[in-house]
Amino acid sequence: MANAYIYIMTNKPLGVLYVGVTSNLKQRIYQHKRRKSDGFTKKYNLHSLVYFEIFDDNYHAICREKQLKKWHRAWKIKLIEKTNPQWRDLYDGL
């Protein structure tokens, strides 16, 4: 089974947050970093991967993405800081 991912990107610690879903995390983050996709991440220069989760299928990843998009900002920040308190860019470790 192919993996699916949800991820959160930002431009700086406690900055603008973006929640996305993809089936190829490394490639998708690379695209965001190189500003190859028009849209929210390009407009706000979101270049740091600060959180991600892995799923066995797209359905569950999409459900989780929709759930996180409804969350309050403070809840997302708490989620990030639980596993990444320094807000490090996790891209290089993929």
Image (tube, rainbow, N blue to C red):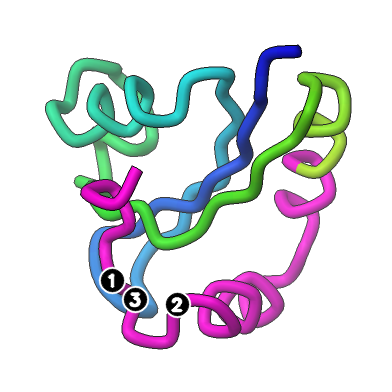
Along the viewing direction, whichever of 18 and 91 lies nearer the viewer: 91
- Residue 2 highlighted magenta (yes or no): no
Q: Is residue 91 left or right of residue 69?
A: left
Quadrant that contains the N terminus:
top right
- Name the amino acid, label 3: Trp
Q: How far apart in space, not on screen, are marks 1 and 3 (Cα)?
A: 4 Å
In the figure, 59 relative to 48: above or below? Answer: above
- Name the amino acid, label 1: Arg
In the figure, 4 relative to 88: above or below? Answer: above
User: Callout 1: 10 Å neighbours few (<14), some, many (20+)?
Assistant: some
CB contact under 8 Å: marks 1 and 2: yes
- Name the amino acid, label 2: Asn
Quadrant that contains the C terminus:
top left
What residue sits right under mark 2 in the picture?
84
User: What segment is highlighted magenta in the picture?
Assistant: 65-94
Mark linked to residue 60:
none
What residue sits right under mark 1 in the picture?
88
What residue sits right under mark 3 in the picture?
87
Q: Is residue 23 left or right of residue 57?
A: left
